[in-house]
Amino acid sequence: SHPHVSSRRTEQLIAAVMLLAEVILLTASSGALGDCDTDRDCQYNGECVDNACQCVPAFTGHNCERFNFVPIDREKVGAGLRSHDEKSLQRSSWGGSVLRDNDGIYHMWAAEMTKGTGIKTWITNSQVVHAVASDPSRPFEFERQEVVWPVFAHEPTVSRAPSGEFVMFWSSDYGQPKIPCTGQSCFGYNGTSDPSCPNDQQCTLDPGEPLLTFMSYAKNPGGPWSEPQLVPTPDGADTNMACYIEEDDSILCLARPAIGMFNYSNWRDVKNYTNYMPDLSGIEPDQAMYGEDPFIWKDTNGIYHAVLHGGGWDCPFGYHYYSEDGFHWYGSNHVKVYENIIEQVHEKALNLSRRERPHLIFGKDGKTPVAVTNGVTEAWPCTLVPEPCPGSNGTYILCPDDYCYTLAQPLNGWEDAL
């Protein structure tokens, strides 16, 4: 062929390739190749508009995959539950389930460690207490009230029934002896356990007490509470159960991933709750749900969401999953919906060694997230050893200062939603 023709064709080909590259770059910058095609790509925490996710205020990220926290301003808001006893000594608490009453007052139910101990002794010293944020000028500042369930009672999660009842699920064992593990409570000082206190891997009872799941309900947040009912669970397992009650009184519960889910047509009829494994094939990359301490809610568009605690010692974070029907779940196990650094306006950031038991606080519509609560410890550095004895939960070995409290961190938009 003629050399000039060949050269001209080469130039035309180069120009076409350059034009195609420019189109690809422009398309990518508009989001068509990146962020989303549908609202599901935004994890239903926002809308897909022109191939870009527009997140609701409480979430952020290209795919609305992370909580959009605001730094804690202690001049404007409280930071959760940090109570003291009659001697002004610290009480340890571990995770708070929060609901808004009809009068606009927020109530919390939290696990509290007795006798001056910390989280290490949860299996021998935990009880459930009620707390109230009664000052509207200090949102998220909870003051401890009464003991709801004495030792042993742990991991309370409270749902609201359409008829108004407050419905609590928690772990307990009212068999003999009443205290699991060793049969007796331990002791501590100022919210920190004595080094002699056993952790949950040093239990000596044979056989060990099963950690059973109970349900009770009350018309008022301060009680009285109904007689506890045992929820049938596989092998008396510690379920970490968290539930959402629908408008028709049916119930949907999420437990530890290995246990799965529970449902039934009427939340009151616990003996007929059905246990099943959900479809996790939509979760990337390995079609599995991870973590523990689940919390489940339903957003303004009828989409179910779940947050679970993940990570090990010194690297706590949260997983987020979502579902259109409560059975088929989606999400990414590469994404951390929250991590362990808490920004503050007037103080240095908190670097948490543990951040677990996630619960959401909702605004006046009952659907819009305004804050996240967690059971946390601030103790750093922890002593990390290759093979902690008696196990990875050896609090005394890893984190000798096991004082813990229930932190509340506001989400973007909280002031408008309360």
Image (cartoon, grey):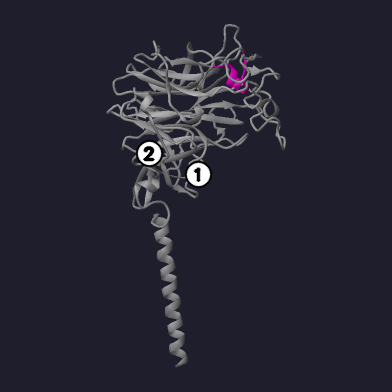
Question: Does residue 418 appear in the picture of this structure?
Answer: no
Q: Return the mark for residue 56.
A: 2
Query: What is the span of residues highlighted in magenta in the rendered image?
Result: 116-126
| Furthest residue toward left | 248
**Magenta stretch: dominant secondary structure:** helix
Circle 2 SS class? loop
Circle 1 SS class? loop
Confirm whether the magenta stretch covers residue 120: yes
Q: Nearer the viewer, residue 105 or 69?
A: 105
Question: Does residue 125 appear in the picture of this structure?
Answer: yes
Do the CB atoms of the residues marked 1 and 2 lie less than 8 Å apart? no
Q: Which residue corresponds to the image point at 47% horizontal and 47% vertical from the top-left?
A: 287
* Neighbourhood count class around disc 1 (C-alpha, 10 Å): few under 14, some 14–19, many 20 upward: some
Residue under label 1, please give it.
335
Q: Position of residue 364 (x, y in %)?
A: 34, 25
User: Image check: 346 left or right of 267?
Assistant: right
* Neighbourhood count class around disc 2 (C-alpha, 10 Å): few under 14, some 14–19, many 20 upward: some
Q: Position of residue 120 (x, y in %)?
A: 62, 23
The quarter of the image holding the N terminus is bottom left
Query: In front of the other: label 1 or label 2?
Result: 1
Q: Give residue 60's quadrant in the image.
A: top left
| Furthest residue toward front | 207
Cα–Cα gap, marks 1 and 2: 18 Å
Q: Nearer the viewer, residue 292 or 314?
A: 292
